[in-house]
Amino acid sequence: MFKRFTLHILLTLLLTGSIGFIQAQEENSYAMWESFYITPDNTKLKALGEAMANHNKKYHNEDGPYRATVYNVMTGPNTGKMVWQMGPLNYSHLDGRPSANGHDEDWRDNVMPNVKKISSGEYWKQNDEVSNTQMLAEGGYEFKVLHIRYHEVAKGEGHQVKHLMGQIGETVKAMEGENPWGVYINEFRQGYAIGRHIATVGFMKNWAEYDEDNDFKATFEKVHGENSWQNFVDGMDDTFSNSWDEVWEVNTTLSGN
C-alpha cells in the first residue's frame, strides 16, 4: 500500500498567506510541460484518432519543446478522457510554438470537430531538487504507466511542507530498485475551489508494478528514526486538505513519436 503512497507525495509548495511554491532550481534552467484534458466525441473516436495522430506526427514529432505525448486516462472521474502534453519546454519556447504551415488550421478543421471539450489547460514545472527522472529516456516510452497524485494544501497549513518534502525525498532515494518519480508545480494560481496545486508522478513500466511492495514505512523509519512514522502521518494530515489519484497510459499511436 505504501509504495504508491510514497512515490507520489513528494511536495514542493510553501504557503505564506497565499499559495507560493519553492523553486530551488535556477529560473533559466527548468523543465515545464503544457497539458490539457480532451473529452472526445465518442461517436467520432476513429476520426479523432486519425486526425490527432496525423497532427502530432507532422507538427510535434521531434524531441524537444514541441514534442507532443498523448495519454489515456484510466482511473478516476476523468476516465475516458485524453491528456495532450507538450514539452519539456520553458516560457520562451511558447513564443515560437508551431502555428504556421497549416498547423492551426489542421487542429481547427481536423481535430476539433471530433472533440466535445478541452479543459484544465495548465503548465507544470518540475522541481529538479527532489525529482528523480534522470532514468527516463528522452523520446522513449519505456515507462508507459503514470500514477498521478494531485494535492491540495490546506489554508494556512504550508509551514510543514518543506520538512515533509525532505523526509519523503530522502526515503524514496534510500529505497531499493529503480523508482522514477517527479514533482510538478502548477504554475498558475488554482485557488481552493480547483485545488490542483501540485502533482507528483510515479513512472512505471507496467501495471504489474502495483503488485510490488517496497515497504516504504520500514525504509522511512530506518532513515528518520524509530517512531518517526506517526509524526509524519500527522503532519501530512494537517498540511493537505485533499488529494486524489489518476492513472494514465501512454498512447503511442496518437503521440508525436
Image (cartoon, helix red, strand yellow):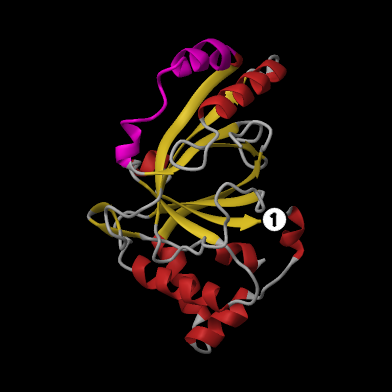
Q: Is 101 colored magenta in this rendering?
A: yes
Determine if residue 207 is in view. Answer: yes
Magenta stretch: helix, strand or loop mostly: helix
Left or right of 119 in this view: 202: right
In which quadrant of the rendered view does residue 69 lie? top right
Secondary structure of the residue carrying numbered label 1: loop
Q: Where is residue 254 in the image (x, y as percent from the top left)?
A: 64, 31
Q: Position of residue 55 (x, y in %)?
A: 56, 23
Q: Tell me if residue 164 comes above or below residue 222 in the rendering.
A: above
Q: Tell me if residue 131 comes above or below residue 198 in the rendering.
A: below
Left or right of 248 in this view: 30: left
In which quadrant of the rendered view does residue 172 lie? bottom right
Q: Name the residue under label 1.
A: 205
Q: If the image is split into quadrants, where does the C terminus sit?
A: top right
Q: If the image is split into quadrants, where does the N terminus sit?
A: bottom right
Q: Which of the two residues, 243 or 211, is positioned nearer the viewer here?
A: 211
Q: Is 108 colored magenta in this rendering?
A: yes
Determine if residue 188 is in view. Answer: no
Q: Where is residue 127 in the image (x, y as percent from the top left)?
A: 39, 58
Please report the bounds of the magenta region as a residue range.
91-113
Q: Position of residue 103 (x, y in %)?
A: 47, 19
Residue at the spot 60% in from the left edge and 32% down from the top edge: 82
Tell me which amino acid carries mark 1: Lys
Residue at the spot 37% in from the left edge and 73% down from the top edge: 163
Q: Which of the two residues, 48 or 92, is positioned nearer the viewer here?
A: 92
Residue at the spot 52% in from the left edge and 37% down from the top edge: 62
**Mark 1 neighbour class, 10 Å CA radius: few under 14, some 14 to 19, many 20 or more:** few
